[in-house]
Image: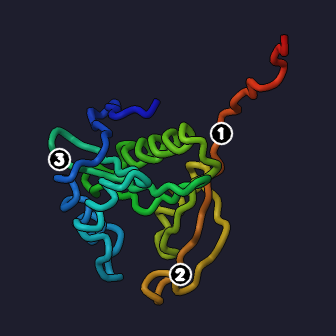
Amino acid sequence: MLLLHFTNSEGIRLELGKPKDAKTIGLMSRDLIENGLGWTWTPLRVAKHIFNPNSLVVVARSKKTVCGFVILQFTEKTANMSLLAVDPSFQRKGIGSDLVRFVEQSANAAGLASIFLEVREINKGALIFYRSHGYRQINLLPRYYRNRETAIRMVYQLKVPIVPDNTKHRSTS
């Protein structure tokens, strides 16, 4: 069962993104993630992911303010963490870690094997953050961002629960 919301010790509530959050998420992406690259995660693109059954958009909310978010895209066996950001005034409060754990638990519950992500090579803080959560580098992708900046592809291997095979040892009588 997927939790639809979670409140951390700081009173920050994690919940599924709503259409009204698309503008805030898009602006946060522009300012905090895509800075210097050009804006591609517009509110319209974010809204499409909010409605897409193969995506999970989770926001961290302080009262009514979106203070962080994550967007996860699912394939048949894996997921890709497309975006994760926390407003600078809310950083160092565990919100990013809570968002990562939330999507990891969701992907694990969906039976996925791993979560991939790409991060700008120059974003040392993000690299340290993801490594501290068990993500490991698997590729270097030159000119990945707008044919200008190098990305580092990382992966987190999920601990997929073993489902017993109930077809064995059935009585044939």
13 above or below 60? above
Measured Cα–Cα span from mark 3 to mark 2: 33 Å
Q: Nearer the viewer, mark 3 or mark 1?
A: 1
Q: Is residue 104 left or right of residue 157?
A: left
Q: Is residue 68 left or right of residue 168?
A: left
> In the orientation shown, which residue stands out farthest toward the front?
173
144 above or below 63? below
> In the orientation shown, which residue stands out farthest toward the bottom?
147
Do the residues bearing badges 2 and 1 touch, measured as CB atoms within 8 Å? no
Mark linked to residue 150: 2
Mark linked to residue 65: 3
Q: Quick one: label 3, few (<14), some, or many (20+) residues within 10 Å? A: few
Q: Which residue is mark 1?
A: 160
Residue 57 point in image, percent of width and height = 35, 51
Mark linked to residue 29: none
Residue at 23%, 67% (x, y): give it: 44
Say what amino acid the circle numbered 2 marks.
Thr
Q: Is residue 75 left or right of residue 165?
A: left
Say what amino acid the circle numbered 1 marks.
Val
Measured Cα–Cα span from mark 3 to mark 1: 34 Å
Residue 50 point in image, percent of width and height = 30, 54
Say what amino acid the circle numbered 3 marks.
Thr
Mark 3 or mark 1, which has the lower sequence index?
3
* Secondary structure state at the residue bearing disc 1: loop
Residue 26 placement: quadrant: bottom left
Residue at 53%, 81% (x, y): give it: 150
Mark 3 or mark 2, which has the lower sequence index?
3
